[in-house]
Amino acid sequence: MFEFSWPWLFLLLPLPWLIAKFKPTQHSTSQRLRMPSFASLSSLAPKISEHSRGVSWLEGLIWVLLVIAAANPQWLDEPVALPNEGRDIMLAVDLSGSMNEQDMEYQGRYVDRLSVVKAVLGEFIEQRQGDRLGLILFGDTAFLQTPLTRDLNTVSQMLSEAQIGLVGRATAIGDALGLSVKRFSQKQDSNRILILLTDGQNTAGNLKPEEALILAREEGIKVYTVGVGSDGRGGFSLFGMGGSAGSSIDEATLKHIASETGGSYFRAKDVSGLQKIYQELDELEPISDEEQTFRPQLALFFWPLLAALALIMLTILIKALRGLKQEA
């Protein structure tokens, strides 16, 4: 279907005619006295008048095309139904300094923990078609990077751009959980699932994990906690060889949060440990939402705009040629 976004702009079509009609004209004696050779030019008057009418016609057409372009013509395709069943999943990712520990093997080499999290979560996000995903990043505090959305490409992009130390180098687990509660409270019908990935224990923030847990439980949020980090040695860190930092994970707190909210705790010592969460989340019952549709739009404003530009060039050329002929 063809339509204009702002059809009221067509009210501007008679504007040039109104300006020409009501524009005050000034005739001075000095101007009339400067026309002694008017008789000699009378023979050229029909030609000049003919050229002027042609140019005026082109200028009028240019104005019409510009108004059409400004009204934003567009073609609307048939409505496309959006998925109305899915899950609401919030991802909370630790960006503390210890996530830089290179103790996890990925594709035959040891890499830092955040790189593995990005790789595995990137695949996870791609498989969430129909779900709404959000992203929380936390360090010294927690902030919402992406609200719940079905735009999975944006969530994946925001995750890939996350950097260690972006929000400090400490670990505010309680703040991340509390922020998730706040965001989910704005959703009435929701699975309210939080996946919290961290490699340490709560060392910062305004909210203690125990306090945030009470809020999460009251709101019915199911929390899946993931402890990231290897127990073995073989990786590299800034403080020496080996990945011994994995032992700093507060597994007791993470397990308690998961069990009290009906979720599960996963220990991700390698890539397969992170991937285990896929199957369990797929088994959760998706929620039904109101059916939503959108209509693909194809903008067409550039066609009349290009035509107007072409006619402007033609008008300039005609005036230039007319000037050359008069000089000759």
Image: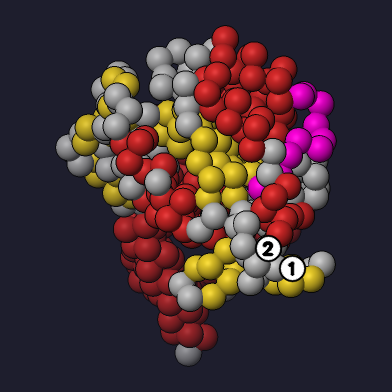
Range covered by the magenta-colored residues: 199-208
Placement of 318 over or under 260, stated as above or below: below
Question: Residue 84: x and y, percent?
Answer: 27, 26
Q: Amino acid at mark 2?
A: Gly
Q: Secondary structure at mark 1?
A: strand
Could you tell me how far apart the alpha carbons at marks 2 and 1 are, in whole angstroms? 7 Å
User: Where residue 243 is drawn, which disc sits there?
Assistant: 2
Mark 2: few/some/many CA within 10 Å (<14, 14-19, 20+): many
Q: Secondary structure at mark 2?
A: loop
Placement of 161 over or under 197, stated as above or below: below
- Majority secondary structure of magenta residues: loop
Q: Earlier in the sequence, mark 2 or mark 1?
A: 1
Circle 2/circle 1 CB separation < 8 Å: yes
Q: Mark 1 sits on what residue?
A: 237
- Identified at 60% across, 69% down, the residue is 111
Viewer-side label of 2, 1: 2
Question: Residue 276: x and y, percent?
Answer: 40, 46
Residue at the farthest top position: 218
- Identified at 29% across, 49% down, the residue is 298
Mark 1: few/some/many CA within 10 Å (<14, 14-19, 20+): some
Q: Amino acid at mark 1?
A: Ser
Q: Is residue 206 magenta?
A: yes
**Image quarter for residue 130?**
top left
